[in-house]
Image (cartoon, rainbow, N blue to C red):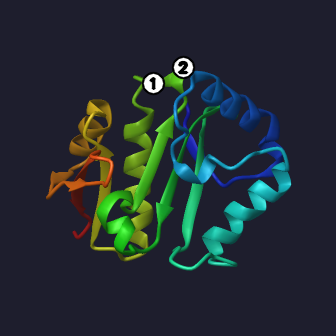
């Protein structure tokens, strides 16, 4: 199977709506969080993702972030990733440089590992020496992916609601 990360585009509206609706029906929170916006105005959604990548109109405290959709050779959207170009205090605690998620019906096929490896290449090109990737403490699969990609566990962060966020650092220097 041929996989690639693609820039959000209105030409993939039907594929995106299928991806989004499957996730919404599952009852799970959509990950990465950049994709939780209502896709009813699809052109605005795509433009918002492009603007965020370019740093245009960012709310206070936000950083530029690149979103890519993982597609197969038929352009079915299998997952998505969000690559933050910098870290703020909250991102240092819980968000990290990378957020990624695989649609529920496609998990267990190595897609998360593929996306994380590709996002690490992107961060390296941005000259970020160490990437922070986080996972909730109860997400064993995500932690395995992060460790498989070189993640070394740092100090965890406990959110106000008691949720424990595991924080992993991945060295991107040669």
Residue placed under numbered mark 1 in the picture: 107
Q: Is residue 133 toward the left or the right of residue 73 in the image?
A: left
Give the residue displayed 36% in from the left and 61% down from the top: 96
Q: Position of residue 14 (x, y in %)?
A: 81, 34
Give the residue displayed 53% in from the left and 73% down from the top: 62
37 versus 12 height, above or below: below
Q: Quadrant of the N terminus?
A: top right
Mark 1 lies on a secondary structure that is loop
Label at residue 170: none
Residue 74 seen in the current view? no
Label at residue 105: 2
Residue 44 seen in the current view? yes
Q: Position of residue 93 (x, y in %)?
A: 30, 63
Marks 1/2 in contact by CB < 8 Å: the verdict is yes
Give the residue displayed 31% in from the left and 45% down from the top: 135
Q: Is residue 168 toward the left or the right of residue 76 in the image?
A: left
Q: Position of residue 34 (x, y in %)?
A: 59, 54
């Amino acid at each position: 199977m041929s996989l690639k990360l693609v820039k959000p585009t209105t030409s993939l509206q039907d594929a995106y709506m299928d991806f989004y609706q499957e996730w919404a029906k599952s009852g799970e929170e959509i990950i990465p969080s950049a994709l939780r916006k209502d896709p009813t105005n699809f052109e605005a959604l795509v433009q918002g993702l492009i603007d965020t990548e370019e740093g245009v109109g960012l709310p206070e405290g936000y950083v530029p972030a690149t979103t890519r959709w993982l597609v197969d050779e038929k352009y079915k959207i299998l997952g998505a990733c969000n690559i933050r170009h910098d870290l703020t205090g909250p991102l240092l605690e819980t968000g990290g440089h990378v957020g990624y998620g695989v649609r529920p019906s496609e998990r267990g096929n190595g897609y998360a590992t593929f996306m994380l490896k590709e996002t690490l290449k992107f961060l390296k090109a941005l000259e970020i020496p160490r990437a922070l990737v986080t996972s909730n403490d109860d997400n064993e699969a995500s932690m395995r992916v992060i460790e498989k990609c070189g993640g070394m566990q740092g100090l965890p962060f406990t959110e106000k609601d008691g949720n424990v966020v595991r924080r992993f650092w991945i060295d991107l220097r040669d």
